[in-house]
Image (cartoon, helix red, strand yellow):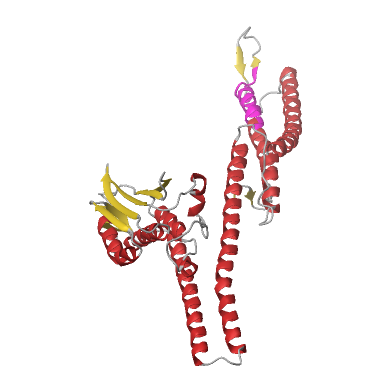
Amino acid sequence: MSAVGPWRLGWVPRPRTLRMRLAVLYGALFLVSGVALLAIPNAFVGSSSTVRASVPGSGADLTPLSPGLSRPSLADTQRGHDIDRYVTGSVVALVALVLLSVGLGWLLSGRLLRPLRTITATAGEMSAASLGRRLALRSSGDELTRLGRTLDDLFARLEASFQAQQHFVANASHELRTPLAAERTLLQVALADPDADATTLRAACEQALLLGAQQARLMEALFTLATGERGIQRREDFDLAEVAAGVLDRRSGEAAGLGIRVEADLGPAPVSGDRDLAEILLDNLVDNALRHNVPGGHLGVRTTTDAGRARLDVANSGAAVPAAEVDRLFEPFQRLGAPRTRTDDAAHGHGLGLAIVRAATTAHAATITATPRSTGGLDLRVDFPPRNPTAPPNRS
């Protein structure tokens, strides 16, 4: 008869619930302990059961009697009956106590597993519409209470993540519907005009193309945001100063057209990460600094290394930014609402720039700090983690 499980030997059924398993375990342990307790004295009794009888004429000399050569004495017979009664009573008492231990184990395990049943029931009843529910177990300090607190924290994070996802989807759908509705209205008006000529239709088509380009930029920004939140797939060593120099060279004409003075102080800043994602981070920081600047303002970009950690500083002039609004600006589709320098904000400003920056920063395990300037604008600092010199870069 071979064992097929921790609780099943041959035909013996395995208890289905943890409560029943614990009750059976309590009874089994009590049975093993009781059998051992009975076997020890019985072993001693058996070892001293050599029958001795007095040999006639020998006085006090006692000689052991061989089995089958003489009848047992009355004392020996009585002692055998006493041992039989003792064993029988012990077995009956052991069986009763085992059954009692199983019953008490059932009650005690039910009491101990009550928080686990609460956790199971609450988790089973939770859904997307009821993520606000909490277990709120009484503070007893045991393992199940700590598990309940951990699950409450997990439910809170899930609720916050789900709410953020709902907010993001609602804003994204609004941003996507707006140009689609404008494009359809534009084309319907052009087609419904009986006096429309080639010039009018051409202008309507050009406007439709602009709205289509707006949708394409929005989709590209959403894809970039999703890429940043996915994390780094391949790592390589690069200098943040070189990336910053390329971004500033590409945006220098735009800055000059806006009348914004660019100041660059690019010292060596080695980083291990995704170079393309770092370039997206820098491009969005520079874009945000140009977009929210003022004519005749300035933009400063600085890269340094401090205690083995690369640091990027981007400072720009602009409108005053309330300190209470800074954190909100890093959420998707959030705008400050201040006047902007560019005339095509309706086509370019989706409120995703700083959200992309935060996603790219998180992917690099870096930290970003935004501080409003007293004269207007923002000071943004990104601190990258130190590179691991023992780990070879992955350039695959």
Q: Which residue is drawn at 72% across and 21% down?
A: 79
Please state if 244 lies on the left or on the right of 335 as rendered: left
Where the C terminus falls, by quadrant? bottom left
Image vertical order of residue 43 relative to residue 149, above or below: above
Q: Where is residue 115 in the image (x, y as percent from the top left)?
A: 68, 40
Does residue 77 belong to the magenta stretch? Answer: no
Q: Where is residue 99 in the image (x, y as percent from the top left)?
A: 75, 36
Please state if 59 lies on the left or on the right of 392 as rendered: right
The residue lying toward the viewer, choosing from 169 and 334, is: 334
Residue 19, picture quadrant: top right
* Majority secondary structure in the magenta region: helix
The magenta segment is 34-52
Please state if 209 lies on the left or on the right of 99 as rendered: left
Q: Where is residue 224 in the image (x, y as percent from the top left)?
A: 43, 65
The residue lying toward the viewer, choosing from 268 and 386, is: 268
The residue lying toward the viewer, choosing from 297 and 122, is: 297
Does residue 47 belong to the magenta stretch? Answer: yes
Image vertical order of residue 292 relative to residue 57, above or below: below
